[in-house]
Amino acid sequence: MIKFERKAERNIMSLNTASLADLIFTVLFFFMIVTTMKNEQSTIEYDTPKSQNIEKISNKQHILYIYIGRQKGENTFNVQFNGTFTTPQNVGQMVAKARTKMTKQDGVDTKICIKADKDTPMGIINDVKKSLQLANALGIIYSANQTNTIENKP
Amino acid sequence: MFRRKHRHDTGFLNTTSTADISFMLLIFFLVTTSIDSEKGLLRHLSPLKDTETQDKSTCLQRNMLPICIGIDDHITCDGNEVTAQELKLRVEEFVENSENSPFLPQKNERNIPLLGLCEVTDEHIIAVEVDRNARYDTYFHAQEAIMSAYVSLRDKLSRKRFNHPYSQCSQAEYDALTQYYPQRISETERENTD
C-alpha cells in the first residue's frame, strides 16, 4: 500500500528552474557594476574623524591609501602604505614609486587618501604631508566618517 | 520535417546547477567588493617652491587671520578661543569683508569673467599654525570649518549672481567663483612648547 501512494506523489509537476540562473546572473551583474574591489587591507586600527558635511569622492580608481593608526595593543602610531609599514618621511618616495607604475594620465589624476586615526598627533600628519609635497603628490583627501546626528564638535 | 522531429528527442541539458554556480559567483562578489564610497575632505597641498615665495613679514596685518590649533582640542582664532562653528563664521566674515572694514583684508579691483569688475579680498591669508602634539581630529574639524566657510561664501555669491546653488555651477562659473573667493591658506608647524 505504501508503495502505491509514493507512485502517486511522483506525478507532481516539478518547478521549472531554468530561468532562475538568469535571474541570479542579473543580480550578479548588478553587483559587479555597482561595486569596486576591496583594496589591500590595513593591519592597523584607525578611527577616522566624524563629519556631517563632507564630499563624496567619485573616482575611486585613482586613489592611493595611506593608513595611520595604532596596532592592536600598542600605543605608538604607525604609517602603512601598500601593505607595508613605513616612516612618515619615506611615504612620499613610496607614493612616487607607485605612481610611476601607473599610466601617465592616471598618475596625474591620482589622489592620496589619508585614513588617519582621530588621536594621531599632528606631527606625524605634517611629516607625511611634507613628504608628499616633496614627492609632488599634492591632491590629498582627509578621509572621514559621515554622521547624520549633530554632535558637539570641539 | 522529419529531421526536426528527430532533433526533439535529444535530451535537454540539465540546467539546475547553473543557478548554484551563479550563486557562488554572486557570493564571491559580495564578499570581495565594497559598496561604500570614499568620503572625505579634498585638499590641495601647495607645491614646495611656492610656499617660500610669500614671506609673512611682507603682508599686512589686516590681511592675516592667525588660527592656532593646539593640544586638548583648543582652536584659537586671532587670540580668542573658538569652536569649529564659530571659526567658520569668523573665516566667512574675514574673507568676505562685506563692509570694507579697515581691520579686515583689503579689497582689490579685479576683472573676473562672468562677474565683471568686482572688489575682492585676494590678498588675505589664513595662517594656520598647528602644534605637533595636537590631535588630528581637532585639525580635521578646523580644516572642515575653513573649507565650509569658503563653500558657503561661494554658494551665496552663486545664488545671487547665477541664480542657482554652487553645486550646479558650470566649470566657467566655478572658475569665476574661485577667482572671487580664492583659497589662501598657509600652514605652519609649531614645535612642542612645553
Image (cartoon, coloured by chain):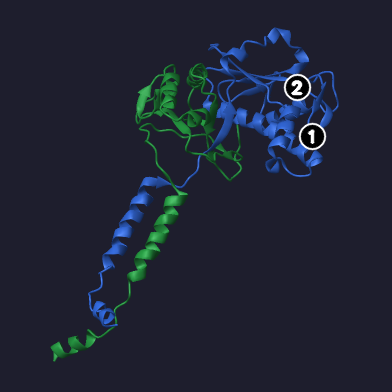
Chain colours: A green, B blue
Q: Is residue A43 left or right of residue A55?
A: left
Give the secondary structure at mark 1.
loop
- Chain ID at mark 1: B
Question: B101 or A151, which lies in front?
Answer: B101
In 3D space, how far apart are the residues under numbered discs 2 and 1 (Cα atoms)? Answer: 17 Å
The reply to whether label 2 and label 1 mark residues of one chain is: yes
Which quadrant would residue B53 be assigned to in this image? Answer: top right
Which quadrant would residue A29 be assigned to in this image? Answer: bottom left
Crowd band around label 1 with a 10 angstrom C-alpha radius: few (<14), some (14–19), many (20+): few
Crowd band around label 2 with a 10 angstrom C-alpha radius: few (<14), some (14–19), many (20+): many
Residue A41 image position (x, y, % from top left): 37, 36
Q: Which image quadrant: the N terminus of chain B?
A: bottom left
Q: Amino acid at mark 2?
A: Asp
Instruction: Give the label, 2 or 1, closer to the camera.
Output: 1
Residue, far top: B57
Give the secondary structure at mark 2.
loop
Residue B79 image position (x, y, % from top left): 70, 18
The residue at 55%/27% (across/down) is: A139
Question: A101 or B157, which lies in front?
Answer: A101
Disc 2 marks which residue? B122
Q: Is residue B7 left or right of residue A73?
A: left
Residue B118 image position (x, y, % from top left): 83, 27
Q: How many marks?
A: 2
Whether B59 is drawn above or below A39: the answer is above
The residue at 46%/35% (across/down) is: A47
Disc 1 marks which residue? B114
Q: Amino acid at mark 1?
A: Leu
Q: Is residue B30 left or right of residue A134?
A: left
The residue at 76%/28% (across/down) is: B180
